Amino acid sequence: MNVGKAGYLGPKATFTHLAVQAVLPGEEHIPYATIPACIDAVEHKELDFGLVPLENAFEGTVNLTLDYLIHEKRLPIVGEIVTPIRQHLMVHPQHADQCEELEKIYSHSHAIAQCHKFFRSHFSSVPLEGVISTAFAAQHVQQHPERLIGAIANEFAAKEYGLKIVHENVHDYNHNTTRFIMISREAHDIPVSNQVIEHYKTTLMVTLPSDQAGALHQVLAAFSWRKLNLSKIESRPMKTGLGNYFFIIDINQRLDDILIPGAIAELESLGCTVHILGSYPCFAVKTAETCQVPQMTY
């Protein structure tokens, strides 16, 4: 089955690009400048699928993704891809011998946060500036060869934008991963042929009844006695007033005909509002170094 068009947070050679290339190789991949722009393109039928980052193992949830899906564009989640994150410091080739004299370093805010130990020990006095993606940082360095600046990004960004890696693996901890979600206009299977499905997951949005003591405990009990394993529960503001929250709950199971519908019915009987955000396969890219970013025309 042909996917058609799959969008991702660009520009080329972001970690999001690597994830979509690993799961949907050979299809048309279109970069978007921001997460909302990619999600909007799916809603407006410019794309069949959109891939956006949702969570980093060390920095937590990408709140922009979650809040935009909840409050602006309620599109179903149809897949999850988890990929390892390897960060490197790169500069324009003509400044390779001056890498210890950088005047500024650019990257995504999450990438900067993942490399604090490196910055403290090597570039403690160098300003750090957050941009929309790691690949955008690399592109910015490429476009300003007159400036002595660097970028934190992956090795494919270095190749794509002709930069020189001067410090490898500058992230503070190993085993760093990022979780990406694939969205579509309708809930359906992803036409994947070369990736093994690790497991399935169902994601719910739950709003508790107001002023009901023990409501969260009752919610968790509805899953517990059914032996439904929850891999994550997170609260986010409803944006309707201080103290008003909804909960995102990930269940490590595909939506079935009995257990999960039974849990939802129990929650609704307690006065909760429940929305199914998606029931979808989860894929794992074993190593970022195995992903190949082709030269494509957009």
Image: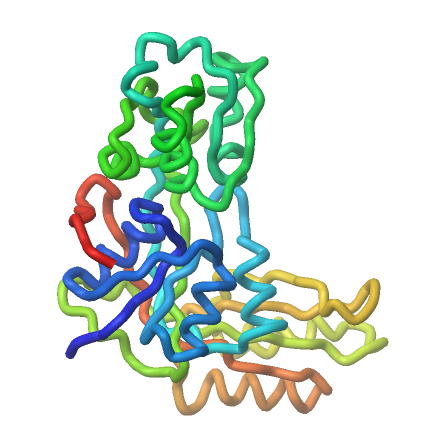
On the image, the x and y values in percent for residue 207 come to 68, 76
Q: Relative to residue 67, is residue 208 drawn left or right?
A: right
Q: Quadrant of the N terminus?
A: bottom left
Q: In this picture, is 202 found above or below 257? A: above
Observer-nearest of 201 and 107: 107
How many labels sit on residues?
A: 0
Q: Residue at x 58, y 56 (%)?
A: 63
Q: Residue at x 44, y 44 (%)?
A: 133
* Rendering colour mode: rainbow
Between 229 and 244, the one lying in front of the other is: 244
Provide residue 236's location: percent of width, then percent of height.
67, 62
Vertical placement of residue 100 versus 228, above or below: above
| Residue situated in front as seen by the camera: 147 or 35 | 147
> Which percent across, then down, holds residue 84?
33, 44
Visible residue check, residue 280: no
Q: Is residue 178 above or below residue 90?
A: below
Image quarter of residue 167: top left
Residue 209 locus on image (x, y percent): 76, 80
Is residue 246 visible in this depiction of the protein?
Answer: yes
Q: What residue is rendered at 51% in x and 22% in y?
A: 104
Q: Residue at x 41, y 81 (%)?
A: 185
Name the residue furthest front: 146
Q: Quadrant of the C terminus?
A: bottom left
Apparent side of residue 98 relative to residue 220 in the rendered image (left or right): left
- Quarter of the figure with residue 81: bottom left
